[in-house]
Amino acid sequence: MSENIYDSIIVGGGPAGLSAMLYLGRALTNSLLIEKKGIGGQMMNTDTVENYLGFPEEISSFELVDRMQKHAEKFSKNPIEYDEIIKVEDINEKVKTLLTADGKTYKTKTIILAMGGFPKKLGANGEEKFSGRGVSYCATCDGAFYRNKTVAVVGGGNSAFDESYFLTRFVNKIYLVHRRKEFRADAINVKHLTDTGKVEYVLDSVIEEICGEEKVSSVKIKNVLDNKIHEQAVDGVFVFVGQQPATEFLKGTGLDMTDAGQIKVDLATMSTNIKGVFACGDSVVKPVRQVANAVGEGAVAAMMATEYLSHL
């Protein structure tokens, strides 16, 4: 058990968490960032970032994350710990307790929750069967396996279009399946993908079933307006239908969350309903999910945590 009582512990090492780490370090606090898997969060699932201010020529996600990490570590008193927080105890007390999967116990005066999320499943028949064998949730990870092949992409937001654009480096054809006629993605992202000439939009439609023997060979697509189903030959399916917040370990703590597990915060202060607990990034309720506002939220959470500490 760690005898050290930290001023703040940040849970999650995406852009929001790294931003909080930087600002807490600059405030000369004794703080610690704990990350479950790898630094960068969901941003590491995309190839390049072209809408982060200061990089007009775009920048690879890996390079941007590396720069963020080095910048945060420059000011932090403690190195990043790699472990999974599985339980929070004494959350309403002045000193809170975090338990990890490796059996460690950490004590802290404040917590900044920046876990982000993980990809939502499509829920189609065959999805689980072919996961890792033709069904993927990361084009950057798996796109190269589909060189000169045909794939289906499901989704209508920026993630679906960014990932599809990356896939055009490898695939011959993309069928982009979206349940509505309008896209949530930025217009420029839609234009970028359309201009490649490699995409065919299948709108007002959903994938009912993913078919094949040992690997994916086709999908059954249903039109939601007339309920007609047709089968389309594809070699793989990429799913980008949103994120599930990584907040399962917070259930039962009294933290105010939606039924979907998103943390409710005051967006002006990133504070939760529990004193000394702040949240930022893609695990909170908010209208926009971009790297830029995640970084800002991390900064606000850290500054408000520092203000809270000054009154203890």
Image (cartoon, rainbow, N blue to C red):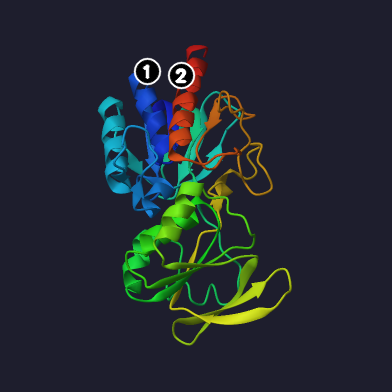
Give the alpha-carbon distance from disc 1 to disc 2, as whole Å. Answer: 7 Å
Residue 120 vs residue 271, the one in the foreground: 120
Determine crowd level at label 1: few under 14, some 14-19, many 20+ residues with C-alpha closer than 10 A.
Answer: some
- Mark 1 element type: loop
Residue 60 vs residue 105, the one in the foreground: 60
- Residue at 40 percent across and 58 percent down: it is 165
In the rendered view, would you say 42 is above or below 208? Answer: above
Query: Does 44 sit left or right of 249 as displayed?
Result: left
Q: Which quadrant, please, contains the N terminus?
A: top left
Instruction: Give how far across and how far down residue 235 sits, in percent.
Output: 43, 78
Determine crowd level at label 2: few under 14, some 14-19, many 20+ residues with C-alpha closer than 10 A.
Answer: many
The residue pinned by badge 2 equals: 306
Instruction: Give how far across and how far down residue 183 sits, in percent.
Output: 58, 54
Write down the quadrant of residue 166 in the picture.
bottom left
Q: Are marks 1 and 2 in contact (CB under 8 Å)?
A: yes
Q: Amino acid at mark 1?
A: Ala
Extreme residue toward the top, this view: 311
Q: Amino acid at mark 2?
A: Thr
The residue pinned by badge 1 equals: 27
In the rendered view, would you say 302 is above or below 259? Answer: above
In the rendered view, would you say 253 is above or below 101? Answer: above
